[in-house]
Image (cartoon, grey):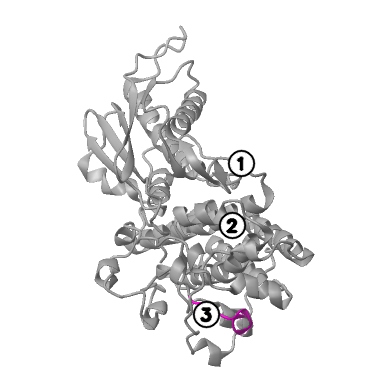
Amino acid sequence: MSAGFRISSALWDKIHHFASFPQTGVSLQQMVLFGQNPSQGTLLKASQFLAEELPVRLAHRVKELSELPHGLSEMPSIRKVQNWYAQSFEELINFPPIVLPPDVRQALMAPRAETSLPESTPNPSLRHLDPDHDALSHHSHDSPSSHYFSSNGPGFNRLRLRVPMERRSVRSRSSFASGSRKIANRPPPVHLRRYYADTEAVINWPPQVQDYNKRFTKMLESIKSRHDPTVTTVAQGVLEWKRMQNAKNIGLDIQAWLDRFYMSRIGIRFLIGQHVALNTQQAHEDYVGIICTKANVHDIVHEAIENARFVCEEHYAMFRGPPVQLICPPNLTFPYVPGHLSHICFELLKNSLRAVVERFGLGDDDMGIDAPYPPIKVVVVEGKEDITIKISDEGGGISRSAIPLIWTYMYTTMEGQGIDQDFQASDFKAPMAGFGYGLPLSRLYARYFGGDLRLISMEGYGTDVYIHLNRLSSSREPLL
């Protein structure tokens, strides 16, 4: 259990060592191509990638959690999350490596040009998450120096250069685990290492491969479960800090950190969820792990509409909530994670439903008659680059001065709401309103694979929200 977990000085040395390496971004397209019909060898290759990549990502977050501004790092809930990340980091680096016969190892490591994955493209969301991104975009990934970064200044550990998956550097796990200062100060050798295993060379995988995959997957499931309440626990930590500081809103520096932290969390949980699904779920024609290769936008949005209306009717004790009109081609499909899209639409529809109900009232409760509500309109169109979803309501709109605040964590227009101490199951179970995380988190989910979320409001009338989804699926994760 993590309740009594403490970060030792030796573990801190290893955390700082791993945090000196850049993170490796993957694209949705690469994950789909990699995971099609995976053999035990392919899954082993994925396990090896995660055994190297996840400790680096976790180390970045542990280090950053210890360097937060204004005393935020000292809050009990923030310390709790830091310990969760450090414990998961320790479990990963101490996981026993697999011992393979020389011929199997050679088959796994042999470079095969014909099986290389397509190039991923920079995520446009980086310009929103990192102001220095555009100034750094001229660096070439082909230079050995581009595989590393230094963090000599005060404050956050800002990742300056990012290495795409198809140009990942190889690092020795034994040198990682040693935590030696000598090794930590010396950059690793640069080689090409792809997240792909050509398994045609091996027909019968030895039993230790399947055993390793099972054990590694079981550990990842435990880590994922440990981190389920991270969103609400960090939010509780920010509340603790606000009470201590007697602050009404959080500053831009904490807002920027929350964006980076939650974006990283989305990425870590996506990689773990994808790997667990590939190892445990039955093969499905339209699914590669948790990625649906033919995600039907109409069906996903329609389900989000029904769920949001149900929550609205339950919250306000209504017989029938405001109507929602869906205008969408019935057969529009593209590769995406249905859970991400459903979460985004659900949160935005809840906002629109609440705005409409609160503007037009609840009707006559005694007679069981609901107020006549104008419909909320959801329009979906497909372009060459994006699939765009527009959600339009007549809920009265938002004042121009309040527009910047709606993207701020912990900001809510619903009075008397807070974080339920028992609300720790996951990111995808939320009350009608009041948590203050719906919009900013939805924007991060949209941006994770190269999309975006934009809002235009007409005070006195209503609000239009645009969800842009990258239908090309080639943008890699925005890692900071």
Distance, label 2 to label 3, CA atoms, is 23 Å
Q: Nearer the viewer, residue 29 or 113?
A: 113
The residue lying at 56 percent from left, 77 percent from top is: 15
Distance, label 3 to label 1, CA atoms, is 41 Å
Q: Is residue 415 visible?
A: no
Distance, label 2 to label 1, CA atoms, is 19 Å
- The reply to whether callout 3 and callout 1 are in contact (CB within 8 Å) is no
Could you tell me which secondary element the residue under label 2 belongs to? helix
Residue type for callout 3:
His
Badge 1: residue crowd in 10 Å (few <14, some 14–19, many ≥20) = few
The residue lying at 42 percent from left, 43 percent from top is: 438
Badge 3: residue crowd in 10 Å (few <14, some 14–19, many ≥20) = some
Could you tell me which secondary element the residue under label 1 belongs to? loop
Question: Where's residue 374, x and y in %?
Answer: 31, 19
Query: Mark 1 or mark 2, which is nearer the start of the sequence?
Result: 2
Quick check: 470 above or below 245? Answer: above
Q: Looking at the rendering, which quadrant does residue 261 occupy?
A: bottom left
Does 312 sit left or right of 395 as displayed? right
Numbered label tally? 3
Query: Mark 3 or mark 2, which is nearer the start of the sequence?
Result: 3
Question: Where's residue 159, x and y in %?
Answer: 39, 72
Question: Where's residue 90, x and y in %?
Answer: 64, 72
The residue that disc 1 covers is 284
The residue that disc 2 covers is 272
Q: Which residues are magenta?
A: 169-176
Quick check: 253 above or below 171? Answer: above
Quick check: 263 above or below 427? Answer: below
The residue that disc 3 covers is 16
Q: Looking at the rendering, which quadrant does residue 480 occupy?
A: bottom left
